[in-house]
Amino acid sequence: MNFKQVLKQIKKYNEIVIARHIGGDPDAYGSSIGLKEIIQYNFPNKNVYVAGAPSAKFRYFGDMDRVPDDVSNALLIVTDTPDRRRVDGVLPTDFKYRIKIDHHPFVEKFCEIELIDNTASSASQMIIELAFKCKLKIPYSAAEKLFMGVVGDTGRFMYSYTTTKTFDLVSKLIKNTNLNFTSLYPQMYLRSYNDYKFNAYITNNLVITDNKLAYLKITNDVLKENNVDASTAGNLIETFNNIEEILVIILCSEDLANNQIKCSIRSRGPIVNEVAARFNGGGHALASGAKPKSFEEVDELIKALDEVCADYLK
Ligand code: AMP
């Protein structure tokens, strides 16, 4: 893994834009904003921007920047994003040079340097490793964001790609910055009472097949009745990870504004990202998303996942 090559390019450019994937999650925000703050702290004369849409839910990570109109001489660093179409807010081809730092399974090459480690728990873990390997100082606020990124993608160090390397890097991060990490959890895990009520709606309405696939199709009318939006179900999906009768869960919310159905998928065994990729989606082996265009396509996706579960149970 050539972190030094990345440092060499960072040193070379005065204007640097950092982007992450659309529909950002804590790892996407944590890795991109954490890296921005590290670069700014170590190279105060550089102009560094984070690109992409802001999210009300993740506003505790900080603000997004207005990216300059002309980036033809700038460096682009994309974190947590395996493919061009999922890059939020910028066009990679507009930049002079591109670097990818990602932990997803490989999808396509679109950067001159591609630092990919699909054994890393998170892109945030890779940014921590980059900082230590390149002897870059990590300011306190970057440590907070990177810690939250790792915590988000590992489910608080629970999922299988949490390794000794994850613990080593995070432990060093906490020691070096004297990070008060327990103070970060409330902003990540506090939920509104309304969200909990919607969680109960999901629990009560899930359909569970003989093959242990749980699914729920949520129309825009149901979202409105429950006063939630198309992202809420996906944000709650981790709470269904430990139900004995469920191996794979898919929650599908109608997203009228974008004319698609937003689907989040989680698995405790069967590989789901290959199926997701057939329905305008992708992601990790056990945590994926998809965006079919209609509920008819959602039915096909559910059927395909049920078959994956059936094969797994055999
Ligand atoms: P989510 O359910 O949105 O938290 O997504 C879980 C994982 O799947 C993340 O790694 C996402 O980047 C990825 N993912 C979600 N939606 C899509 C999509 N439509 N296409 C490709 N990857 C996705």
Image (cartoon, helix red, strand yellow):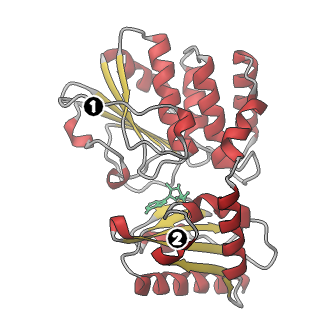
Cα–Cα gap, marks 1 and 2: 42 Å
Left or right relative to 216: residue 259: left
Is there a contact, CB below 8 Å, between mark 1 and mark 2? Answer: no
Secondary structure of the residue carrying numbered label 1: strand
Nearest to the observer: residue 43 or residue 114: 43
Q: Quadrant of residue 280?
A: bottom left
Q: Position of residue 97 (x, y in %)?
A: 27, 31
Badge 2, how many Cα within 10 Å: few under 14, some, many 20+?
some
* Residue 267 visible within the image: no
Reply above or below: 218 against 42: below
Sequence order check, earlier mark of 1 and 2: 1
Q: Position of residue 95 (x, y in %)?
A: 23, 34
| Residue with the mark numbered 1 | 97
Identify the residue at image location x=76%, y=19%.
175
Left or right relative to 177: residue 2: left
Reply above or below: 221 against 211: above
Reply above or below: 121 against 286: above
**The residue under label 1 is which amino acid type?**
Tyr
| Residue with the mark numbered 2 | 223
**The residue under label 2 is which amino acid type?**
Leu
Front position among marks 1 and 2: 2
How many labels, in total? 2
Identify the residue at image location x=71%, y=61%.
196
